[in-house]
Every structure is written in C-alpha cells, then in structure tokens.
Image (cartoon, helix red, strand yellow):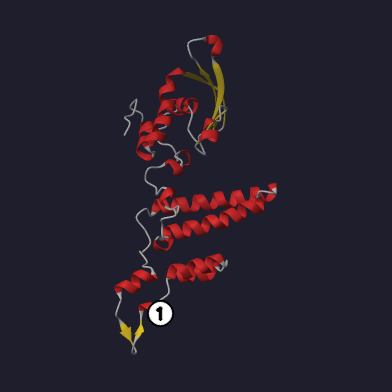
C-alpha cells in the first residue's frame, strides 16, 4: 500500500477505499495541490465560487480555473472537468475542500469500480475452459450482459430512449450499490449442479430402481431459462 504524502483525512479515505494503482493517480493530485492558490470570488447562499490559479514557476504559463462548492448538497465542481472525464477528483477541488475544512467526502466521489473491496468482474467472465453452470454468480452475470447488449442496441439509435434508459440504469445502480455495501457479507448459497448431485447420491434409489439424482433439475438452469424468456416474476419466485 502506498503511504499518504501528508496527514490529510481526505487522502487517507482514498487510500483505504481504492486499489493501490488508482490511489496513486489520486495521490498525484494531492501532491500537485501545493502548486495551487485559491481565493473566494463570491457566495450565493450555500454555493461558493472560487478562482483557482495553478502555477508552474512561469507566470506566463499559469492556468486559471473556477471551482464551485455547494455546501448544502456537498458537491464540488471544477471547470477543468477532471472528475467528469476521468473520475479522479482534481487538485483544484482538493485545494478548496482542504481550505473549507472538509475531512470526509461523500460516496459519490469514491467510485465503486475502483474500490478494492469489490468483486472484480474478470472472475465472472467465462473462458473456454470454464463450466459456467458451476458458478451461479457468473451465470447471472452472463445472462444480464446479454440483456444489456440487446437494450443497448435498441436504445442507441434514439437519443430520447437512450437518455431515459441511462437515467433508469443510474438509479438502479445507486440503489443496488447501496444495498451491496450495506450487506457486504451476504452471498448466495452454493447450489450444486446436476452432475454434482448425481455423484453425491450415486446408488441412491427409491421405488425400485429409479435414481433420485437423475430426476433432479438444476435450479440455476431453470432460473436462467425463465429469465431468458423474460418471465421475471416466475424467476423471482424460483430464486427465493
């Protein structure tokens, strides 16, 4: 783990949350903060507007930015747009936050995809040597990707539809991200496949010579079938 460059609670928050590689990118902005000077231009209610000048030893090459800090909604925006483009909070915003005495950032500035406490999607992507049915998480992931691909094809041709879908996706993402973070230790019960059940029950018979395992149906296969048929209510019931 990379050490913090200074005793800032904000930097420590990123160090605790992010992978080492991404933390180094954020840390570079903290290091460059020393080249930034700011002054308050105006305030309107809870919105404060700052002028931020980034220096590099040559006054002819100085860069000027504007940073807007909404203390009610705890939102900071900089005209450099680094966070909007790369998802990394910029040195200019960091300067304002530290000047304002902020010690903790809200979750929206700690992007989920770079957290070190999440399951990486590469473990959910099947390869030619995988048996996908043995991994219920991967099976659901694969099925969901298929549906997302179809949705993307349908909505990418219409701006109105695209915007509506993206808004819905964002709302659902925030909802289930919050639920996932609130219940990090919950996981699915491991569901054996038909082959595993047959092996574990080999030789077990009832009513003469009928093999019980041979009559069992893989629940994940049935669930996947219902989802693929868009029978979501039945799938929900089957899952629980």
Q: Position of residue 171 (x, y in %)?
A: 55, 51
Number of numbered discs present? 1
Camera-side residue of 138 and 102: 138
Residue 240 in view (yes/no): no
Q: Looking at the picture, does residue 56 appear above or below residue 193?
A: above
| Residue sticking out furthest to the bottom | 208
Q: Position of residue 14 (x, y in %)?
A: 39, 35
Seen at 46% across and 71% down, the residue is 238
SS category of the residue bearing label 1: helix
Quadrant occupied by the C terminus: bottom left
Q: Which residue is rendered at x = 66% and y = 54% of the image? A: 154
- Give the position of the N terminus as an image quadrant: top left
Q: Which residue is mark 1?
A: 215
At x 34% / y 74%, what residue is drawn?
198
Report the front residue among 17 and 2. Answer: 2
Could you tell me residue 123's position as x and y percent?
40, 51
Tell me if I can see residue 168 in this picture: yes
Q: Where's residue 170, x and y in %?
A: 55, 49
Would you place residue 126 above or below residue 27 in this image? below
Q: Seen from this angle, which residue lies furthest front? A: 128
In the displayed structure, 45 sits above or below 53; it is: below
Residue 68 picture quarter: top right
Question: 227 above or below 53?
Answer: below
Mark 1 burial class by Cα count in 10 Å: few <14, some 14-19, many 20+:
few
């Amino acid at each position: 783990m990379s050490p913090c460059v200074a005793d800032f609670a904000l930097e420590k928050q990123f160090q605790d949350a992010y992978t080492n590689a991404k933390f180094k990118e954020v840390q570079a902005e903290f290091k460059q903060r020393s080249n930034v000077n700011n002054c308050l231009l105006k305030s309107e209610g809870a919105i404060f507007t700052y002028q931020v000048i980034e220096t590099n030893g040559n006054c002819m090459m100085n860069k000027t930015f504007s940073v807007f800090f909404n203390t009610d909604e705890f939102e900071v925006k900089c005209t450099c747009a680094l966070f909007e483009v790369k998802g990394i909070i910029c040195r200019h915003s960091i300067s304002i936050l530290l000047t304002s005495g902020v010690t903790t950032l809200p979750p929206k500035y700690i992007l989920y995809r770079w957290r070190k406490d999440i399951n990486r999607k590469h473990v959910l992507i099947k390869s030619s040597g995988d048996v996908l049915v043995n991994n219920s998480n991967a099976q659901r992931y694969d099925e969901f990707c298929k549906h997302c691909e179809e949705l993307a094809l349908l909505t990418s041709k219409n701006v109105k539809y695209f915007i509506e879908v993206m808004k819905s996706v964002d709302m659902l993402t925030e909802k289930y991200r919050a639920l996932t973070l609130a219940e990090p230790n919950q996981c699915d019960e491991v569901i054996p496949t038909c082959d595993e059940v047959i092996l574990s029950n080999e030789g077990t018979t009832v009513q003469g010579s009928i093999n019980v395992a041979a009559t069992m149906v893989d629940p994940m296969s049935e669930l996947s079938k219902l989802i693929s048929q868009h029978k979501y209510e039945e799938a929900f019931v089957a899952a629980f």
